[in-house]
Image (cartoon, helix red, strand yellow):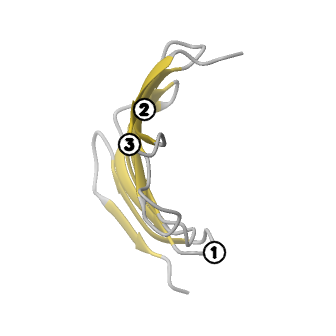
């Protein structure tokens, strides 16, 4: 089924940005890469919370979030998808910082 949305197109007809609404009613704004070797970004709301994700064609990602329980975080993954840094800020209690370079 088609997802309702709006796309802003570049002169070449490719989408520069798109706003979509999922079948559950959650919105996402996609900022598409200019070329296959450029990064892209997504701002979205889903059943788990809110997210901002930056992706690179190499596979590396940076992900900010606030979940429905109120926890905020930052996750950075390398080009293999391995988590390298996790930072979690709970509603109460200490910030959890985990560099994962073992």
Under circle 2, the secondary element is strand
Compute the Cα span from label 2 to label 1. 27 Å
- According to the picture, the residue beneath numbered tag 1 turns out to be 80
Q: Residue at x 52, y 24 (%)?
A: 47
Of marks 3 and 1, which one's residue comes earlier in the chain? 3
The crowd level at tag 3 (other Cα within 10 Å; few <14, some 14-19, many 20+) is: few
Q: Nearer the viewer, mark 2 or mark 1?
A: 2
Residue 67 horizontal/vertical position (percent)? 41, 35
Q: Residue at x 28, y 56 (%)?
A: 94
Residue 79 horizontal/vertical position (percent)? 57, 75
Compute the Cα span from label 3 to label 1. 31 Å
- According to the picture, the residue beneath numbered tag 2 turns out to be 18
Q: Residue at x 55, y 87 (%)?
A: 102
Q: Is residue 90 above or below residue 95?
A: above
Compute the Cα span from label 2 to label 3. 12 Å
Using the rendered view, name the quadrant where residue 71 is placed: top left
Residue 27 seen: no
Asked whether, in this view, residue 68 is left or right of residue 36, the answer is left
Kindly indicate whether the residue at mark 3 contacts the one at mark 2 (C-beta within 8 angstroms): no
Which residue occupies the foreground of this view, 52 or 5?
A: 5
Kindly indicate whether the residue at mark 1 contacts the one at mark 2 (C-beta within 8 angstroms): no
Residue 4 horizontal/vertical position (percent)? 53, 15
The crowd level at tag 1 (other Cα within 10 Å; few <14, some 14-19, many 20+) is: few
The crowd level at tag 2 (other Cα within 10 Å; few <14, some 14-19, many 20+) is: some
Residue 73 horizontal/vertical position (percent)? 36, 51
- According to the picture, the residue beneath numbered tag 3 turns out to be 10
Under circle 1, the secondary element is loop
């Amino acid at each position: 089924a088609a997802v309702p949305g709006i796309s802003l197109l570049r002169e070449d007809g490719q989408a520069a940005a798109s706003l979509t609404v999922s079948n559950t009613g959650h919105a996402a704004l996609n900022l598409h890469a200019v070329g296959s070797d450029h990064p892209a970004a997504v701002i979205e709301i889903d059943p788990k919370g809110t997210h901002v994700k930056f992706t690179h064609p190499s596979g590396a990602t940076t992900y900010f979030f606030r979940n429905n329980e109120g926890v905020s975080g930052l996750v950075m993954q390398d080009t293999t998808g391995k988590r390298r840094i996790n930072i979690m800020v709970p509603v109460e209690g200490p910030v959890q910082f985990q560099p994962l370079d073992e």
